[in-house]
Structures are given as structure tokens and as C-alpha cells.
Image (cartoon, rainbow, N blue to C red):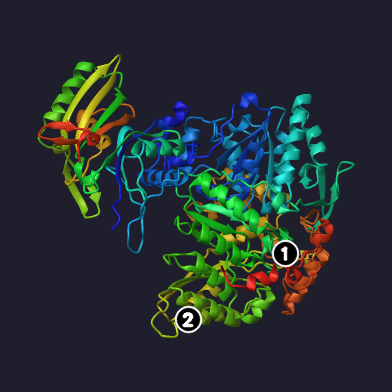
Amino acid sequence: MIIFQKLWAQLIKGPEVRFISHLDLLRAMEKALRRAGLPLSFTRGYNPRPRISFASALPVGMTSCGEYVEFIPKNPHQPEEFKEQLNKQLPTGLKIVAIKEVAYAAPALMALINLARYKISFRLPPEIKARVFLATWRDFYQQEEVKVCRQTKKGMRTFNLISHVHDQRVYLEGDNTALAYIDLHLGSRGNIRPGELLQAFWDFAGYEGCQPVIQRKGLFILQDDCLLSPLKIEF
Amino acid sequence: MKPELEEILPQVSKPTRYLGMEWNVIKKDHRQIAVSFALAFPDVYEVGMSHLGSKILYHIINKREDAVAERVFAPWTDMEAKLREISFPLFGLETGTPLADFDMIGFSLQYELTYTNVLNMLSLGNIPPSQAKRGPGDPFVIAGGPCAFNPEPLADFLDLVVLGEGEEVIGELLTLLKDWKEEGSGNRREFLLAAAQIPGVYVPSFYRIDYGDDGLVLNVEPLVAGIPRRVEKRVVADLNEADYPTAPIVPYMDVVHDRAMIELFRGCVRGCRFCQAGMIYRPVRERSLEKNLALTKELLQSTGYPELSLTSLSSSDYSRIRELIGHLKAHYGEGGLRMSLPSLRVDSFSVNLARETEGLRKSSLTLAPEAGSQRLRNVINKNISEDDIQEAVNSAVAGGWDAFKLYFMIGLPTEKDEDIVEIARMAEGLVKTRTPKGNRGVRRVTVSIANFVPKPHTPFQWVSQVGAEELLRRQELIRGRIKDRRVIITGHHPDSSLLEGIFSRGDRRLGKLLLAAWRLGCRLDGWREHFRWDKWQEALTLTGIDPAFYNRRQRSPEEVLPWDHLSPGLDKGFLWQEYERALAGEITPDCSFSSCSQCGVCPTLELPIRLRGGDDNFPKIMGPVD
Ligand code: SF4
């Protein structure tokens, strides 16, 4: 039996590529790997797929400084070399910043990662006072329930947005620019998007700010109330 | 990226279309460059990015240190609305340079139903659509591509037109443009006069068209001394010497043809009488096996594509196709390279090639018998028999395909109901195909029925198009004959085919129709969801143009056709003779395998006549694959 190598890497998705969809990003990575001469191993079966997977799909329009990718290369590589060679072939805006080899038996990244941190900045309407905004923000997050309906594959489903929020914090910067940090749970209960959370807030507040700039600051493993970076855990 | 774009892109569909930062993109500082060229494709990104000709020109222009080429595509309606809302001019994708700041804008004319997009893109770029209204600061607007062989409907809007292959002409034009700019007179006419001296360049405004009382063209008269009466197309004599884009842009989004492309040869001399490409791209010129292999290597290395398309007008006709596939499999099979062979000939030889190349049988196999009856196939010179078709399908079923797509046309010259019902009979017969052991059969046959549109420079350039009601009746006739549930018929709307028919054989007087339709909101006419026949009819009424004069009229052999002064090298006599042979049901064999059928191209273009029947490559293709 061939023992494959498993590599985990941390990837930056910069503003240049923020409009690239998840599927397009995956295909771009596959091509970059082919150019770099770093062939992946393939899944078996009727429709073989290269073995590359992302921990979590990043919504279109967002940048990120911490996406995680798992590679199963066809041949083993020295991880740092793999990173260097791949970076040379990645388009502007994409960059591997850290890489690590883990045991082949390590669980799937997708199953481990359960929290995403977002940084959201937006401008408030000029007529809204800072104090009023901060109070509304607090009231919004003190609710037990914020329900939204969403069309899913299984039909219409109702979500409680608040139950997906792990933590949040908001600051005001200069004249009416708000900066929010929001930690959202990821995983089995279905993911919510920071955009829809913000929209629910506008609906609650009764006014609407400017189009937000959203950045994913990172993906984490939440364990016993501690946030762990996926590459810091030993497997 | 400009902040305005950052703002609107999240609000439009498929923002990836407008980014311009794909792998292998070339960005240059316009301030350091003598001449700038916008490669304008009058359709959306996904379509334009699949076009090989544009990739070739992008590569050739950007190779020059004194020139820059950027891409611009037709924006989708939501993007157009946003651009107009914030008055943001249409721009070159690479650097965001406004269209009006380029020295030259070159449109690729692939299809008549993109003409309103040309006007729309000029308008979005703040460039006067009418060439007569352009001044010293405006770019030159030029065009090329298959429709440039009758660019007359666009004559009012184009400064010049390039006939034939652009590889060499583009360089000559850019050098001229650079000199003209340096000289600094700003006199547009001076530039156009000099450009008209370049072989293959046609300046519509230098010709006067005289019409008779009956509306027919009487005469086409050059208005300036030294301007050719008849403009001959340009060809690249030796493809091995031609520049080829080995580091093309790799799009992020899933474009129509998202794969590496190798052009095996140019031209096709099978001589199908309806096919404009087969007529205007003569003669056949092959790229050598060695060259194709060398280009493939560079191409795969620079793009990382897992798929390679072996393109041409009829890929199984490449004289060394089996050797090529053998080599490619030996070199790249291990790395999981997939190969595809578009435009397959309908015979078992071709299907066997497809069996060797396409590892997976996920998609259906496409074959184009074009007509249902042998009589009609003889008329259009599609030299395949019913046995060829059945054998092709047998071979495909044995190779694992269980779904087929069959392309047919209706509305062909001399077509009778007897011919049409044969389409249904053939489909019903083919769907019953089973392997000799009987263990495999056909799951589905999709019959795609296109409406025939007569094209300039073909033997059918004189015939009347069949009307909308009759086309629908013929479609229904086929539908009514299909009993087997596994056969699916898909038809095309006659209204867009008839509109295509107006412009394909149109003249300059149609410029006002285009303008009127565009003003009424027509654009993206090739996209069914945007096609507005009601608006086109309104535009016809407004301009008083009788569509039947263009699409529903049989021309006489003496008539001066609006494109007679534009030459792809063919003798008009050859085309007429082919038309007469069509009516008599006589076939004309492929000139590259039997004898020269004297179409006129080789002598006119001063190219040697090369017949492959006597070529020493020929026996090799009969041998086994290594
Ligand atoms: S001149 Fe003869 S050999 Fe040349 S393309 Fe025409 S038919 Fe073929």
C-alpha cells in the first residue's frame, strides 16, 4: 500500500482575487499545482478528482488572511519546498504563508475547524449618532433569537442567527466608520454569513449603512473556550 | 482597481468577467508605449475568452515593445446599467484604461447577432459610433473575423476592415499607426489612405456604392486613386513560421472552452457548400507534427491546463492525427491529460480517434450529418453516407458512449418534406443501435435542428432563405415523426435566424437599421433572453427597410453582390458552378485528397497547390498508433 503525505497550508486571498468564487479558486489552485510540477494524487472511482480541499468556502467578495487547504500530493515533498514552488505559480493575490505536514490519519480539516473570525467595516449614515448606534448594536446582540428564513436544498428553513454568534465586538473609528469583529460558529448546524447578520442588524435598526468591506481574519478550532490555530495543533 | 469598480462589482452577476488579473495577463504602462490596441470582442467574457484568434493577436501585439493590447468584452446588462448609472466608461481589462484612450479598437466579428454589441460598446466607451463623426482625438475602429468578409452593414461605423488572417497585417497596421502618430498631423484621412495600401485592408468610406431603382447594387466605385477595386484577403503561407500564443491567459471562471488549444491546421477543403468557414479560410495549411508537439509542451507548462483541445475545422483530417495522439498519450497520459477533438467528421475513423483520446464518456458524442437524406447531403456536398453515420455510432456505442447529439439543418436549398422526414427516420434508427453482443445500447439521441442561413462567399450566396412559418412547420414535421421517447428534438427560433439572414447578406443601407434597433434597446441579440424581435420589427418599420429584400430573395447570377469587391480568393465562377452542381445533386470531392477543384484560392494567393493524396505523410496515417 502506498502511504500518501498530507499537507495543511494557510492561504491568503487578497483583494485582487476577492471576487473569485470558491469553485474557481479550487480550479486555479489545481492549475498552479500542475504548472509547479507538484501533481496531486487522485480520488478513486468513476470520476477521479485531485485530492485538494478547503476547510471552508469563502463567500465571494471577501478577502481572507487565513484560509486552510489540505493537499495530498502524488509524491512526498519537503513542505517548505512545496510551499516555495507553489507560490511561484500562484496568481497575484494568492499566497501560501505557512505549511505543515500532518499524519495521514489526521482528521479532515473541514471537520476540525469550527469557528471563523470576520472583520467588518462600514460607514454609518451621517444622521446616526455614535451613541445611538452602539446602543442599538448592543440591544441587537442581546436578543435570544433573530430568525431568518432561507431556501435550502431541503426546502425553506428557519435559522436563529444569534445562536451562531460566538462573540462580537464593535468599535467606532473616526467620523462614523464602524469596525466590527465577529466570531461565528461553523459546522453541522449550517453556516451563516456575516453579510446576512449585518443585514438583520440594519433591519433591526431601521436604517442602513454603506456597503461593508468584509475580511475573514482566520479560521480556528474552538476547544474548551480556547481558539487554536489549525497549524498549531500536533497530529 | 478603481474605487468605482470596487463599489459596483459586488452588485453585478459574475464579477470575475471584469477583473483582468488572470494568470498570464500582460499589463503595460501606457505612458511608455507608442501605440495601444483594444482587442474588442462583442460578446461576453466567457465567449470571447474561448476565441483562439483573439489569443493570437493578444500575444503578437504584446510581444512588441512599442505596443500594448488589452481586452474588452461586452458587459452583461446588469453591468451595463451600473456603468451608465455612474457614467463610468468601458475600459480595457488589464489596466482599466478607458476605451476612448486607446489608439485603435479592433472588433472580432464572429456572428451577425453581435453587431448591436459593437455599437453598444462604442457608446459605453464614449466613442462616436459613426466613423464620419470621429475626430483627431478618437481611436480608429477596425474589425476582422469571418463576418468581415461582408462588413457592409457596419460600414458606417468602421474606419477600416481587415480581410483574412490577422497575424501579419496587425503588425503592419501598428507600425503605420505609430509613424502617423509620431508625425503628429492628426489627419485621420491620411492614415486611412496609407492603410488602404496594405494588402488585405479595406476602408469602406473610400468606396461609393451606386444603387439602381430596384434597390440592387449597380456598381462599387473606389473614390480615391490608387485604392484597389477588389481587396484580397491575407493568409499566413506557412503555419510553422506563424507566431502562436504558448502562454495564453488562463481565466478563473468557467469559460466556454476552458482548455489549452492547439491549432492543427487552418482551412478545410471538404467543400461543404453551406459552410462559410470552409470557403473563406482556404486553402488547407497544416502545422507540422513536431511543431504541434513543441507548442503543446510550452502551452501545458505555462497554463497548467489538464485538458488539451486539438482544434481545426475538421480535426480528424489532420494528416498525422494518429501519430499526434499517440505521442501526446505517451508523454502526458501519465499526468492525467485529457484530450478533446472538436468538429469530428462523421465516420468510424474519427470516432475511433475520439475513443482513444477521451478517457471518460461523461458527455455525449456530437456528430453533424447536417441533412437527413442522401440526396440532400449531396446537394450540400456533405460527403458522408448513411453507412458512415451508422458505423460511427456503432463504434461509439462499442466505445462506451450512450448519448449522442446530432446536428442537422433545415431550410436548405431544394429541401422537400421527403428529405426532412429522413432526419426523424435516421434518429429513430440510430437510437436502436446495440453492440453485437447486445449488452450496450443508446440512452439518448438529441437532435439539434438549426435553421440554414445563406452566407456570402458560398455557393448558396444567391438563394432565398426559407421563411419563419415554413421553418416552424418543418420543425414540427420532424417532431411529429418521432415515436421513440429517447429521441429529443431541439429547434432554434426562426426569428433570430432570419435576422441573421438580413445582416449576413446585407449592404450599407442596413447601418441605419442597426442604429435604430440599438437605440430601441437591442443588444446581446445572440442571447435568447435578450433577443427582442418586437423591437427589431419596430426598427424595420422606422427605417422603412424591407427585410425580405435581404433574406427572402433569390439573386440572379448577374447581380452585383454587396461583397463582390471583397475577396477571400475564390472565383465567383467557381461558386456559381458549385451552386449548379448542388442543384444537380453532384458532389465535388475534397481537393486535398483528390484533384484541385479550381476554386481559385491557391493561384490568387500565389500559394503552391498541395494535394495530400500524393504526400508522403499519407501512408503513415494508415499505420497503427505506437
Ligand atoms: S485552388 Fe484547388 S487546391 Fe487550392 S484550395 Fe482551391 S480547390 Fe483546393
Q: Amino acid at mark 2?
A: Glu
The answer as to whether the residues below labels 2 and 1 share one chain is yes
- Residue at coordinates 65% horizontally, 73% vertically from top-left? B382
Relative to the observer, which residue lies in front, B103 or B349? B349
**Where is residue A76 shown, x and y percent of the image?**
35, 46
Local secondary structure at mark 1:
loop
Given the image, what chain letter belongs to the residue carrying mark 2? B
Q: Amino acid at mark 1?
A: Thr
Q: Is residue A191 above or below residue B449?
A: above
Tag 1 or tag 2, which sits nearer the N-term?
2
Q: Quadrant of residue B174?
A: top right
Mark 2–mark 1 distance (CA, rounded to whole Å): 32 Å
Contact check, label 2 and label 1, Cβ < 8 Å? no
Using a 10 Å C-alpha cutoff, classify the residue at mark 1 as few (fewer than 14 neighbours), some (14 to 19) or many (20 or more).
many
Residue at image mark 1:
B458
Relative to the observer, which residue lies in front, A51 or A195? A51
Using a 10 Å C-alpha cutoff, classify the residue at mark 2 as few (fewer than 14 neighbours), some (14 to 19) or many (20 or more).
some
Q: Is residue B442 left or right of residue B99?
A: left
Residue at image mark 2:
B428
Q: Is residue A122 above or below residue B397?
A: above
Q: Quadrant of residue A98?
A: top left
**Where is residue B484 shown, x and y percent of the image?**
42, 80
- Residue A1 shows in this picture: yes
Relative to the observer, which residue lies in front, B278 or B596? B596
- Residue at coordinates 32% horizontally, 60% vertically from top-left? A44
Q: Quadrant of ligand 1?
A: bottom right
Q: Residue furthest right?
A: B225
